[in-house]
Image (cartoon, rainbow, N blue to C red):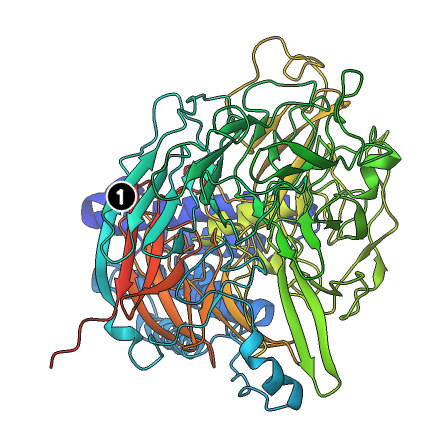
Amino acid sequence: MRPISSLGTLFRAAPLLVITILIVAIMGLGLTAGGIWLAVLGGSFYYLISGLALLLTSWLLARRRAEALWIYAALLLGTMIWAVWEVGLDFWSLAPRGDVLVPLGVWLLLPFIASRLVPGLRAARWALGLVLAIAAGVLAVSLSRDRHDLAGTLPESGTTRAAAAAASMVPGAGEDWTAYGGSGFGTRYSSLNQITPDNVKDLKLAWEFRTGDHKGPDDPDEITNQATPLKVGDLLYTCSQHQIVFALEAPTGKLRWKFDPQVQHNKNFQHMTCRGVAYHVTKPGGVTADGARAPAECPARVFIPTNDGRMFALDAQSGTPCEGFGDHGQIDLKQGTEIQTPGFYEGTSPPVVTEKILIVGGAVIDNYSDRVPSGVIRGFDIYSGKLIWAFDAGNPDPNEMPSASHHFTAGSPNSWSISAVDENLGLVYVPLGSSSPDIWGGGRSSEKERYDSALVALDINTGKLRWSFQNVHHDLWDMDMPSQPSLVDLRTNDGVTPAIYIPAKTGDIFVLDRRDGHQLVPAPEKPVPQGPAPGDRLSATQPFSQLSFRPPGMLTGAQMWGSTMFDQLACRIKFKRLRYEGPFTPPSEQGTLVFPGDFGMFEWGGIAVDPKRQIAIANPQSIPFVSRLVPRGKDNPAAPNAAHPPGTELGVQPMYGAPYGVDLGIFLSPLGIPCLAPPWGNIAAIDLKSHKIVWQHRIGTIRDEAPIPLPFKLGVPMLGGPIVTAGGVAFITGTMDYYIRAFDVRDGKELWQNRLPAGGQSTPMTYEVGGKQYVVTVDGGHGSFGTKLGDYVRAYALPERRS
């Protein structure tokens, strides 16, 4: 049989073959062009070679030559060898390298294609079939293992003398959950043990409450409910994204009272969120910060900060404002600062409550200008709202109080996250961000640099610094201290050491003696990339903790990902065009790959610590960002020419007062998925006696992010932290798919999951009432994170036993 000379004639005889020829040719042209580009940039030659092979296959198909199948078999075999050489037997890394080529190979073997080819068809079909069978075998083997998985089992609780003596003195939550992290220690630990690995599968929805608070037309995209409720007595206290406070009956979820602070809706706010409230009860014989007798009014009170810069004190039983606190129950947190633009200072996290002092931080707008409100940390009388002390990190005298002639320092490092407190030591531990703007430091003063992206330990009663630890020097990557630290009494045969665990965006966990800040786990200074943008400077070294989830080594082109080989090629080209020399590569006009990215490997959810078993549960994530400095020009003026733009932390940020703006974004493929191969999110356990990571597993599926709801367990990003219980179960909800999950803390085995009605970008909690243990999650979704918004508070419990 002679080849048909024209495609028109061939199309009339075999239309599917002609369509196949055209598709293979288009694929070949795309891969050849992109492959040339990548090769010129110094990347892999594979895509160029595969593009040429596809073009040759297309030409041979048009000539109706069976050699087309031989060429395609060689391409497929070469692709397998190259792929396994690059990424090993990792299914999710192999998949985009073969998810187009393998189905196309099967298509070429079908009778209406292959039967049109001559000569030597039989041998060619056998060759291609054999290679496809080998490919299927390779994929099957890779599916049976996960090279990113770390299997292990935590040791049983120690039986040291110190452990036995301290067992009954472990701080944490029990029947009640009285602070954001369970207690002021921020461990997210509960001593409840009714729910165990054996019965957690039986958990059922006990009650559900709808707040009725939804996103409005004048709200920013960055809207979310990240609250962890508190439970005291028979009431559960929580809040919604507009800082509306709800008191619910703990056994049923029925509304007892509600307080609406009437926060304005404004698109210019950078955030609209609530991470929770704080609770205080007056002790017998309680006194104010000035030594006077505590007032009888509001013996138990709930505190709520607002996104428009106020703080309310409410009676815990009725929800009415405490009249003696500030101005009829509220204080203006913008007082003392010169810049009072609405939305520039926002209360997004609950304050720290101590016996007499309310300690308050707040979020300051990121990357808008160097003229933004101070991030000053303040201590107020918990009864009257009177300002007692200030810690203004950017001021030469950080404890200088405001006056008619003095305002707090504009752009001072702020604390937008949650602090921890040890009242026995008289210290509050405050995680600080960087000076504004985040991505440019050429104009920062030495005073602002002192405590940039640091943890400061302040005297509760005076605000004076006891010690500090800086996680990043001269931070240009938004690597601020994001998490509430966890306070743990480490027990050994030599005694007890009061420690503090500080999760960082970099993936490091710094472990210090919380009395004086000296390192318990070494964090040596190591050289980092140099070459800042003109006018800026860099630190020659940065601290690297030996307890870290930071990915080893540097990213390579082999780790670039996509849903197909085509967007994977685009990611490899994009990667090669960016500046990247490893962690702390400085921002640049070229565009810098920031990894770990701005989301951070750890966020405000922190870690959960079982202080009895001396273990920690963590949920690190890995998402690269791109940071590109934008010189001043027509589209990036040196000063605002209108009201500041709608609030967002992504896209072009003006950074007025600096010689550049910055364009920030996630490192994504053209199809909008991360360019870095998964897993992007894990759950893991640390043995605090050895400070070793014992087990680590992927967490979460792409069910709610993919166009088709396929529950592929890739390990996804998350916002929110874990909790751990004495029953040996850890709970987490923050993943991009809508689930609450329970894990066995011994080995990380997933024991139970339940579908949520919206994104659960919060940290759950647990409590007991009436002899029953409940687990509660707030499911409000997250606007800029892309999860479904909602207004749900849901409680789970074991079913009643039948007699």
Which quarter of the figure is the C terminus placed in?
bottom left
The foreground one among 293 and 403 is: 293
Q: In the shown orientation, is residue 772 left or right of residue 266?
A: left
Please tell me how crowded label 1 is: few (under 14), some (14-19), or many (20+) other residues with Cα within 10 Å: some
Q: Is residue 292 visible?
A: yes
Q: Is residue 66 visible?
A: no
Which quarter of the figure is the N terminus placed in?
bottom left
Examine the rendered structure and indicate whether residue 669 appears above or below residue 698. Answer: above
Which residue in the protein does label 1 denote?
256
Q: Position of residue 518 (x, y in %)?
A: 82, 64
For the point 56% across and 33% down, the residue is 649
For the point 64% across and 24% down, the residue is 368
Quarter-wise, where is residue 712 in the image? bottom left
For the point 56% across and 68% down, the residue is 87
* Circle 1: element type: strand
Q: Position of residue 526 (x, y in %)?
A: 84, 60
For badge 1, the amino acid type reads: Arg
Q: In the shown orientation, is residue 187 left or right of residue 586?
A: left
Quarter-wise, where is residue 341 in the image? top right
The foreground one among 2 and 247 is: 247
The foreground one among 660 and 79 is: 660
